[in-house]
Amino acid sequence: MTTTTSSTHQALRPAKRLIGWYLALSTATLVGVVLLRHDASVVDDAVWTRTVIVAASAMLTYLFAARAARGSRGAFRRLRIVTAVMTVAIAVITVLPGVFPVWLRVEQFVCGLLLLAVLIVVNGRDVRALFRNS
């Protein structure tokens, strides 16, 4: 079931903007990894894997937000799940010592803050009510 009100566009606008920043940062990081791929002290297999996963999830998250803003309840549910899972995964990445370089942990911390803000928006009572009452 979908809701087609302009209320969903308005309610999810802040989340889409935050996810846009998350996507831009993730994409820029992936581009940086590609450019620095020959420097093993900066880019290793773990960095490659993590940046690809985060960039892909950022793209999916943005697509879910866009569809949710158009009223898709399924996309809204996926948006809530993906942002929660990625926020937890990013929190773990930022606190694990030695697994990832400091520069990537800092980038992930910023991504985590953006996603935390998205979680607050999409789990707000008013936003959830828009999808519950459709």
Image (cartoon, helix red, strand yellow):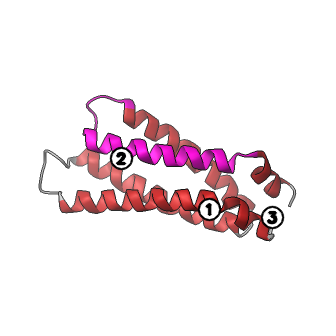
Q: Residue at point 25% right, 31% down?
A: 98
Marks 2,3: beta carbons within 8 A: no
Residue 67 position by quadrant:
bottom right
Q: Is residue 87 visible?
A: yes
Q: Secondary structure at mark 2?
A: helix
Q: Which comes before the other along the chain, label 2 or label 3?
A: 3
In the image, residue 7 lies in the stretch drawn in magenta: no
Q: Which residue bears the numbered disc 2?
A: 107
Asked which secondary structure carries label 3, the reply is loop
Position of the C terminus, as image quadrant, is: bottom right
Residue 96: horizontal and vertical position, in percent?
Answer: 35, 30
Q: Amino acid at mark 2?
A: Glu
- Mark number for residue 1? 3
| Dot 1 alpha-carbon crowd within 10 angstroms: few under 14, some 14 to 19, many 20 or more | many
Name the residue beneath numbered marker 1.
65
Give the residue type at disc 1.
Ala
On screen, residue 28 versus residue 4, left or right, reads: left
Which numbered circle lies on residue 116? Answer: none
Among the 4 quarters of the image, the one containing residue 79: bottom right
Q: Indicate which disc, 2 or 1, sits on the residue closer to the N terminus.
A: 1
Residue 132 at x, y percent in the picture: 83, 53
Nearest the camera: 88 or 18? Answer: 18
